[in-house]
Amino acid sequence: MAVDVGRTGIWCVSSAWPDDPGRAEAAAAELEALGYGALWLGISRPSLQLPEMLLAATSSLAVATGIVSVWDAPPDELAAAYHRVADLFDDRFLLGIGASHEHAVKRRGQRYHRPYSKVVGFLDGLDAASPPVPRAGRAVAALGPRMLALAGERSAGAHPYLTTPEHTRQARELLGPGPLLAPEQMVVLETDPARARQIARDALGFYLKAPNYIASLLRLGFSEEEIGQASNRVIDALVAWGGEAAIRARVGEHHQAGADHVCVQVLTGEPGLPLAQWRALAQVLV
């Protein structure tokens, strides 16, 4: 059975969650009470301990990984961890996997080679595991046409990261009406243009140098010069900023373009969980 992630969720990197289990569990419970449909945990470890803890602290909130890197553990090991978690929480856990980035893989002493083939082989491994990870229980991080098609054919659907409503429109056309399309959207709840764009630029520094994101932006019509300079046009396309109404409008554009679910990543320029912003945005997003 497919995991119901609802129409709107929150994306938050795993390292932002407090080490204190009580504080982490309370934050997840509050997200559920606020009405968000899902929590996406970025850069998740293959042990899946954090998703398991947060699922145990909630009763209806879906939890998804966004993502577990296919380079971090063998597929049979991840399949065993998946079933440890999914079997405890009926249809509330979605395993998001993806190819990650060359710099992260090299940092672990591995060779980043043919990422598309690596994901294909990893999905094969999840299918061959005993028991296998069901197609409905997994999603694939996807930007380009080949990976998007693979996500639609071999999983519940696609989880594009750092995209625009135009990318969502193109992805829906490629996927067709069936597969899940759950793009991530960065936002800054700040009405001062200079401050908002500076927070966004600080967060995007790495991404605008990563080959896969550069290729995605080029396909969307941005120039190499714009990307290299992190122009206002690039920043404004990738990061929604302003008041609650501006954030709601951008999320609505993704839905109108064909997204089933939009997971919002709040940028503040500060460490820790953006609880105040999650609360404010719940008033207009859920």
Image (cartoon, rainbow, N blue to C red):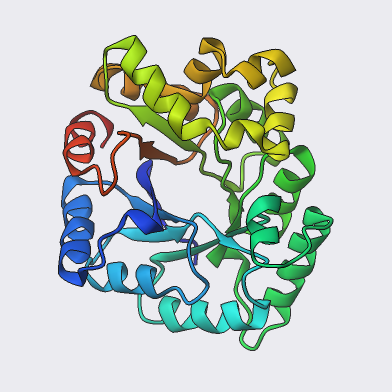
Image position, residue 149 (x, y; %): 75, 46
Dividing the picture into quadrants, the one containing residue 92 is bottom left
Instruction: Say whether residue 33 is left or right of residue 8.
Output: left
The one of 246 and 255 positioned closer to us in this rendering: 246
Instruction: Say whether residue 10 is left or right of residue 182.
Output: left
Q: Is residue 251 visible?
A: no
Split into 4 quadrants, where in the image is the C terminus?
A: top left
Dividing the picture into quadrants, the one containing residue 51 is bottom left
Instruction: Say whether residue 280 is left or right of residue 265.
Output: left
Is 132 rendered above or below residue 152?
below
Instruction: Say whether residue 281 is left or right of residue 252.
Output: left
The one of 81 and 138 positioned closer to us in this rendering: 81
Q: Residue at x 23, y 66 (%)?
A: 58
Is 42 rendered above or below residue 70?
above
Number of numbered markers: 0
Q: Residue at x 54, y 31 (%)?
A: 258
Is 157 rendered above or below residue 160?
below
Q: Is residue 169 visible?
A: yes
Q: Residue at x 20, y 65 (%)?
A: 25
Q: Residue furthest bottom?
A: 130
Dividing the picture into quadrants, the one containing residue 49 is bottom left
The one of 44 and 225 positioned closer to us in this rendering: 225
Is 197 rendered above or below residue 29?
above
Image position, residue 7 (x, y; %): 38, 41
Image position, residue 76 (x, y; %): 65, 82
Image position, residue 50 (x, y; %): 36, 69
